[in-house]
Image (spheres, helix red, strand yellow):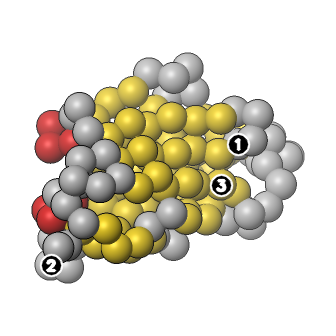
Amino acid sequence: QVQLVESGGGLVQPGESLRLSCAASTRIFSINAMGWYRQVPGKQRELVAAITSGGVTNYADSVKGRFTISRDNAKNTGYLQMNSLKPEDTAVYYCNAEVRGVDLSIGDYWGQGTQVTVSS
């Protein structure tokens, strides 16, 4: 069973930066499309940024110009660079990816989430 593991969350002050990482904890063949979502209590999970297997990116309007999604295909790892963080960016951030396993089957997987808190 493929598991995605996020890391890099934490507590920062407004204006500071964080970089989240997402990697498979088990051996996989490749990661196809990948996305970062976030959720605050009482609200639906929302898409923050996404990247296709070819590197095409898409961002929520609220993070355009501040967040950058990227991927390292050699490491099967995805990243979300978050700059100029605001208190409203506070949420649990989740990684989602379409993964091709070593048996070449394709599945959709979620990470366990990492807390990002922006507060002075």
Task: Say which amino acid is labelled 1.
Answer: Asn
Task: Say which amino acid is labelled 2.
Answer: Gly
The secondary structure type at the circle numbered 1 is: loop
Do labels 3 and 1 touch, CB within 8 Å? yes
Q: Where, by quadrant of the figure, is residue 71 drawn?
A: top right
Rendered image: mark on residue 23? 3
In the picture provided, is 94 more to the left or to the right than 2?
Answer: left
Q: Measuring 24% from the left and 66% from the top, which residue is drawn there?
A: 13
Mark 1 or 2, nearer chain start: 2
The secondary structure type at the circle numbered 3 is: strand
Any part of residue 39 in sight = no
> What is the distance, in whole Å, between disc 1 and disc 2 at their CAs?
32 Å
> What is the distance, in whole Å, between disc 2 and disc 3 at their CAs?
28 Å
Of 106 and 115, the residue lying toward us: 115
Any part of residue 103 in sight = yes
> What is the distance, in whole Å, between disc 3 and disc 1 at their CAs?
6 Å
Mark 3 or 1, nearer chain start: 3
Of 90 and 61, the residue lying toward us: 90
Q: Measuring 46% from the left and 52% from the top, which residue is drawn there?
A: 19
Do labels 2 and 3 touch, CB within 8 Å? no
Tell me the quadrant of the picture where the N terminus can be found. Answer: bottom right
- Count of numbered marks: 3
Of 85 and 112, the residue lying toward us: 85
- Which residue carries the number 1 mark? 76
- Which residue carries the number 2 mark? 42
